[in-house]
């Protein structure tokens, strides 16, 4: 156990006092999909018969090829299995089920960063998915094969995911901002047979060279990869300054252009019927060790969670235009771009580029242009756009927006209020949704027509989710505002099934702390007198930078891989926009650099980390010391480093430090 975890419950004390509250407007409540009595009934049914409740929803919401006979198999707990003897296909449930009645309706409205717009109806999306599914099959990809997707946020990313689902291949999307090395690690861990990428994507006016990174990843290693599909994106029609097609070298026998691969494929593809528990995807996420873990999700349980929460939390109706700004490289882009909204038959917006390109009004311009009614983004984006002032959004007509959402990190009340007042015009409920890569779907969130919201609280668990806050002994913390570990007491269908290739780590990470009694989320939280949850952040060695999870150990491993670095410790410190920033303390081999030499090494190390892991992991600060502060047993005193990074007074006992003078060095 790390010293952070050991000290966690001491650290979890409630400091926030927020007294404003916002009941839903009468008009919103009257028209809402879920009314107060519906929600109460769902809670009642879930409490009375938690397993029967999910079984009933699974029967009603999913189209089964073969209906299951047993809802929950807990014989291997905590490796739970849901609806295990049922058969279905996820892509069929997202596309085919809508064709007869709603095939003409828009599934995806896409805008590229250069301004190119495309619309796909459900019928067109279905055809694209079938063609690409056939292309995958033509290259020998079958049920159970792993396919890594490394693409820009364009419709084809969703097509690729859905096509994998259609043929029973297991996709693993790697965010386009991750480096070639990170991509290689994930391809190798998953044992992927195929990689789907693009010549590039647009981000902040620049081309992100995805194919080049994929080539680098595949150059030495990844022996399992036989096929690389390459979407032509950056030299598309009318796009200025793009790399030419000739600039994308193709490896004979391995690489295939997407458009060539689908050219002769039929627009129909019989779905591969799979077991409910068949893995739909792996998604790598950071934990408290040096290696990211492949979170494995199921087919039926996952889809049920994604579909229900899309409807309950976002109140979606057929005339809504739903925009979740997340990239498909993250879980949010899986559940609320690629799967949930499609299963719910909604219209979704996808935008390829940066929120500030060409200026900070881009999000609001998109909302106006595409008539967005439900908008879901991350606090880091809200804070960055808030900083630009109220005049920027005021240039755009945001009157169609009726509901706002937030995800990924705690939203500070100031940003909540700005979002409410300036973007929501004071009329829109805000759903602050707490969940994780592991939970598959939203767990704790307001139901917008019912729940009274409070800035900074994700309010209450959804029906069927038995969340709790417990102390070090696992006893429920009942005193209002007292902190503890956030846990989930009962299994739920969209929960992760295991960590790919490492079930031991699954058991250890999520279950061992309280002897398998409940799922341990890794977050600290407290609950107020109204039963509302307030998430206080990670209590393990995981940082949350701009809504992205980064393991401190991963960044430390990257730093010590540099020839000049002997030792490194990484902690987080609060950051105005990103929520948390990466702060690294390093010990060099040889002399401790100062002045210009230190500045030069800092630049080099930041680039090094970007190359090893991806730009999002670049340390904001790097401080050099002759030693790192350690306990008698040799553990790095992270709490002390956190205080130093924050510029706080040191309250910890430092009498055991060998060389107290290093504190001054660490302060930088
Ligand atoms: O610490 C919590 C924070 O994000 C972590 C999960 O990160 P990830 O798996 O990358 O998924 C992010 C998108 C679902 C959680 O352990 N987190 C997520 N949502 C919230 C949050 N913290 C506070 N409030 C939220 N609404």
Image (cartoon, helix red, strand yellow):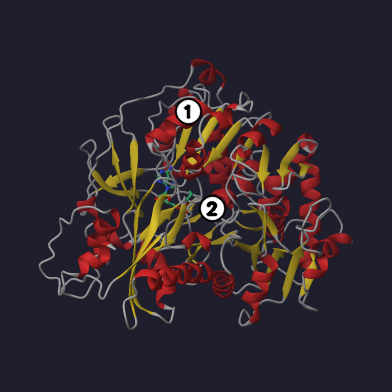
Residue 395 versus residue 468 in the image, above or below: above
Q: Give the residue number, with chain letter if any, for mark 1.
A: 420
Q: Residue at x 28, y 72 (%)?
A: 625
Image quadrant in which the N terminus is located:
bottom left
Q: Is residue 68 visible?
A: no
Image x and y of residue 2, in percent: 27, 66
In the figure, residue 48 lies in which quadrant? Answer: top left
- Report the side of 568 relative to 356 (left or right): left
Label 2 secondary element: helix
The residue lying toward the viewer, choosing from 359 and 68, is 359
Question: Label 1: few (<14), some or many (≥20) within 10 Å?
Answer: some
Disc 2 vs disc 1: Cβ atoms closer than 8 Å?
no
Q: Which numbered circle lies on residue 552?
A: none
Residue 565 versus residue 162 in the image, above or below: below
Image x and y of residue 248, in percent: 77, 69
Of mark 2 and mark 1, the one earlier in the sequence is 2
Q: Nearer the viewer, mark 2 or mark 1?
A: 1
Most extreme residue toward the front, as rendered?
596
Q: Residue at x 74, y 56 (%)?
A: 271
Ligand 1 within 8 Å of the CB at mark 2: yes
Label 1 secondary element: helix
The residue lying toward the viewer, choosing from 475 and 398, is 398
Image x and y of residue 468, in percent: 31, 44
Q: Residue at x 43, y 43 (%)?
A: 434
Residue 266 versus residue 37 in the image, above or below: below
- Report the side of 165 relative to 632 (left or right): right
Q: Give the residue number, with chain letter if any, for mark 2.
A: 331
Question: Label 2: few (<14), some or many (≥20) within 10 Å?
Answer: many
């Amino acid at each position: 156990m790390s010293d952070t975890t050991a000290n966690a419950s001491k650290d979890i004390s409630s400091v926030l006092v927020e007294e404003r509250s916002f009941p839903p407007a009468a008009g919103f409540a009257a028209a809402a999909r879920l009314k107060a009595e519906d929600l109460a009934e769902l809670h009642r049914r879930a409490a009375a018969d938690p397993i029967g409740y999910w079984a009933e929803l699974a029967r009603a919401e999913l189209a089964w090829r073969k209906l299951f006979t047993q809802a929950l198999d807990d014989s291997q707990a905590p490796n739970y299995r849901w609806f295990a003897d049922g058969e279905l296909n996820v892509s069929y449930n997202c596309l085919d089920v809508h064709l007869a009645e709603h095939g003409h309706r828009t599934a995806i409205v896409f805008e590229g960063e250069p301004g190119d717009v495309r619309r796909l109806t459900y019928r067109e999306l279905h055809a694209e998915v079938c063609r690409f599914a056939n292309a995958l099959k033509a290259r020998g990809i079958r049920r159970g094969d792993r396919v890594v997707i490394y693409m820009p946020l364009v419709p084809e990313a969703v097509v690729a995911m859905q096509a994998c689902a259609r043929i029973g291949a297991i996709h693993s999307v790697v965010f386009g901002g991750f480096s070639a090395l990170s991509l290689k690690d994930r391809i190798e861990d998953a044992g992927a047979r195929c990689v789907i990428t693009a010549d590039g994507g647009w981000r902040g006016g620049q081309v992100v060279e995805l194919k080049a990174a994929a080539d680098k990843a595949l150059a030495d290693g990844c022996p399992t990869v036989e096929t690389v599909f390459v979407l032509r994106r950056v030299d598309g029609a009318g796009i200025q300054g793009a790399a030419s097609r000739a600039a994308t070298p193709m490896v004979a026998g391995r690489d295939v252009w997407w458009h060539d691969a689908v050219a002769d494929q039929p627009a129909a593809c019989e779905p591969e019927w799979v077991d409910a528990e068949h893995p739909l995807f792996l998604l790598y996420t950071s934990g408290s060790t040096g290696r990211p873990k492949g979170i494995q999700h199921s087919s039926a349980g996952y889809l049920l969670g994604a579909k229900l929460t899309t409807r309950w939390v976002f109140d979606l109706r057929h005339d809504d235009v739903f925009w979740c700004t997340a990239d498909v490289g993250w879980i949010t882009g899986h559940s609320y771009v690629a799967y949930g909204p499609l299963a719910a038959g909604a219209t979704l917006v996808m935008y390829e580029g940066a929120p500030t390109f060409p200026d900070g009004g881009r999000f609001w311009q998109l909302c106006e242009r595409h008539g967005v009614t439900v908008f879901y983004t991350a606090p880091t984006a809200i804070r960055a756009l808030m900083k630009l002032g109220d005049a920027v959004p005021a240039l755009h007509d945001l009157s169609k927006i009726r509901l706002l959402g937030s995800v990924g990190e705690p939203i500070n009340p100031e940003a909540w209020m700005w979002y409410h007042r300036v973007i929501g015009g004071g009329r829109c409920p805000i759903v602050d949704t707490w969940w994780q890569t592991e939970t598959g779907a939203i767990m704790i969130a307001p139901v917008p027509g019912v729940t009274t919201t409070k800035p900074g609280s994700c309010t209450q668990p959804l029906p069927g989710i038995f969340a709790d806050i417990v102390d070090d002994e696992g006893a429920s913390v009942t005193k209002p505002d007292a902190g503890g570990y956030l846990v989930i007491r009962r299994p739920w269908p969209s929960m992760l099934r295991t960590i790919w290739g490492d079930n031991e780590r699954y058991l250890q990470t999520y279950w061992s702390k309280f002897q398998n009694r409940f799922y341990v989320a890794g977050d600290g939280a407290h609950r107020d007198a109204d039963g509302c949850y307030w998430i206080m952040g990670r209590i393990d060695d995981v940082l949350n930078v701009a809504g992205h999870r980064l393991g401190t150990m991963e960044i430390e491993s990257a730093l010590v891989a540099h020839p000049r670095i002997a030792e490194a410790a990484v902690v987080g410190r609060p950051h105005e926009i990103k929520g948390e920033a990466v702060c690294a303390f390093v010990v060099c081999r040889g002399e401790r650099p100062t002045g210009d030499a230190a500045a030069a090494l800092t630049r080099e190390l930041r680039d090094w980390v970007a190359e090893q892991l991806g730009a999002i992991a670049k340390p904001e600060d790097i401080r050099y010391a002759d030693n790192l502060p350690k306990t008698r047993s040799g553990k790095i005193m992270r709490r002390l480093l956190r205080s130093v990074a924050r510029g706080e007074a040191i309250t910890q006992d430092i009498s055991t430090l060998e060389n107290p003078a290093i504190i001054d060095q660490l302060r930088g």
